Amino acid sequence: TRFGSSITTIFVVYLARKRRQGEIQKKEQEEEKMALQWLILSYVVAAEVVIAVVLTLPYPMVVKKRVVSLVSLILQPAASIVAFAAFQLCDIYWKNEHRLSCSSEVCTATERDRYEKSIYKAQRNVVLCAAGIFLYWCIYRICKYNKDLELLEEAEKRHKDE
């Protein structure tokens, strides 16, 4: 009976590992599909950094007005990055809540490494989403401040002319 129970235990552990390997392979396939979304988001964040740097460089007022007006035209269509990043954050949260935990003796070292790697990727992606939203907000505020400054300068000029 002891021999039979140990065989049963070994068989149960074997089935659990096979099931887990199938789930891991399925998740890896899903992650490969998601990699394109994160690549796009990283390029958008890099573009936002460049735009923010360009907006904050000291230019003559004529050039500054042109740059701000050009970026302002881009801002409205670029607002979709906020919705995209928010959707990705929701996806990360859902995946974190439904993630297979690898803490039992059934997990192998490779499975634990994959689990930790997925945790690190999720953390990186949260930072990427937050950076995308924050940089968009910064660009919006910089453009708004420059437009307000321009309006105040025009009002001051009108006031001096009177």
Image (spheres, grey):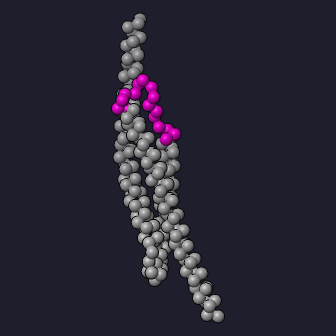
The x, y position of residue 149, in whole percent, is 56, 78
Q: Image point 46% across, 78% down: which residue?
A: 64
Query: Looking at the image, which is closer to me, 55 or 27?
Result: 55
In which quarter of the view is residue 113 placed? top left
Is 102 covered by the magenta stretch? yes
Q: What secondary structure characterizes most of the magenta part?
A: loop
In which quarter of the view is residue 122 placed? top left
Q: Image point 44% across, 49% down: which residue?
A: 125
Is residue 157 left or right of 122 when viewed as pictured?
A: right
The x, y position of residue 8, in whole percent, is 40, 15
Query: Looking at the image, which is closer to me, 71 or 24?
Result: 71
Query: Looking at the image, which is closer to me, 18 or 136?
Result: 136
20 in relation to 12, above or below? below
Report the span colored magenta.
96-111
Q: Image point 44% across, 41% down: which residue?
A: 119
The x, y position of residue 26, in whole percent, is 37, 39
Q: Image point 41% across, 25% down: which residue?
A: 106
**Quadrant that contains the N terminus:** top left
- Residue 143 can be seen in this image: yes
Is residue 145 left or right of 109 when viewed as pictured?
A: right
Residue farthest toward the bottom in the current orientation of the protein: 162
128 in relation to 71, above or below? above
**Quadrant that contains the C terminus:** bottom right
